[in-house]
Image (spheres, helix red, strand yellow):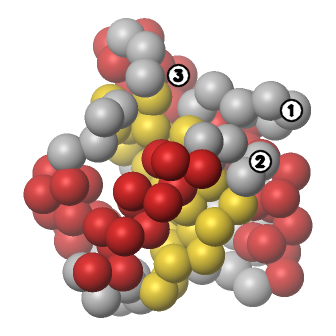
């Protein structure tokens, strides 16, 4: 599967803007969502090829979103990368337990994220 359309989920407009610019400049189509609930609605309406999701958000957390997507047969094929501002060791363990393909630390390093996305495509 080639990754072309990426759903960026973050309650921070600044982080969403940074990630959108990075990904669009690299040729990806980007859709944004401000919450876990909005993410799940957008995935149901128009499934992306990849979800890039913040961990800490009001309402549904990135962990809850990941678990919901990976446990549902209709969305389990969509890879999820979680972004965290906290200790990566703890969040990485939870991310993998919930079914995420990877967990990256904020601030996100553009080249590293793009290389990771290529490995998932």
As drawn, is 6 to the left or to the right of 60? left
SS at circle 2: loop
Q: Residue at x 75, y 72 (%)?
A: 43
Question: Residue 4's x, y, as percent?
Answer: 41, 87
Which of the image's four quarters has the N terminus? bottom left
Q: Is residue 75 left or right of residue 102?
A: right
Q: How many neighbours does mark 3 have within 10 angstroms: few (below 14), some (14-19), or many (20 or more)?
A: some
Residue at label 3?
Answer: 94
**Quadrant in the picture for residue 18:** bottom left
Q: What residue is disc 2 on?
A: 35
**Which numbered circle lies on residue 59?**
1
Residue 62 lies left or right of residue 73; in this view the side is: left
Res 75 seen here: yes
Q: Is residue 101 left or right of residue 44?
A: left
Q: Where is residue 39 in the image (x, y as percent from the top left)?
A: 75, 59
Q: Which mark is residue 100?
A: none
Q: How far apart are marks 1 and 3 (CA)?
A: 18 Å
Q: In this view, does 92 lie above or below 16?
A: above
Q: Mark 2 or mark 1: which comes first in sequence?
A: 2
Picture coordinates of residue 14 (x, y %)? 50, 48
> Is disc 1 surrounded by few (<14), some (14 to 19) or many (20+) residues within 10 Å?
few
């Amino acid at each position: 599967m080639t990754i072309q359309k990426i759903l960026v989920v973050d309650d921070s407009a600044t982080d969403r803007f940074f990630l959108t610019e990075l990904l669009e400049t690299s040729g990806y189509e980007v859709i944004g969502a401000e919450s876990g609930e909005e993410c799940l609605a957008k995935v149901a309406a128009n499934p992306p090829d990849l979800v890039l999701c913040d961990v800490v958000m009001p309402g549904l957390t990135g962990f809850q979103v990941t678990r919901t997507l990976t446990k549902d047969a209709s969305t389990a094929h969509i890879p999820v990368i979680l972004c965290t501002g906290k200790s990566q060791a703890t969040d990485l363990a939870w991310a993998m337990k919930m079914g995420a393909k990877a967990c990256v630390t904020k601030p996100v390093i553009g080249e590293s994220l793009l290389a990771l996305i290529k490995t998932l495509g």
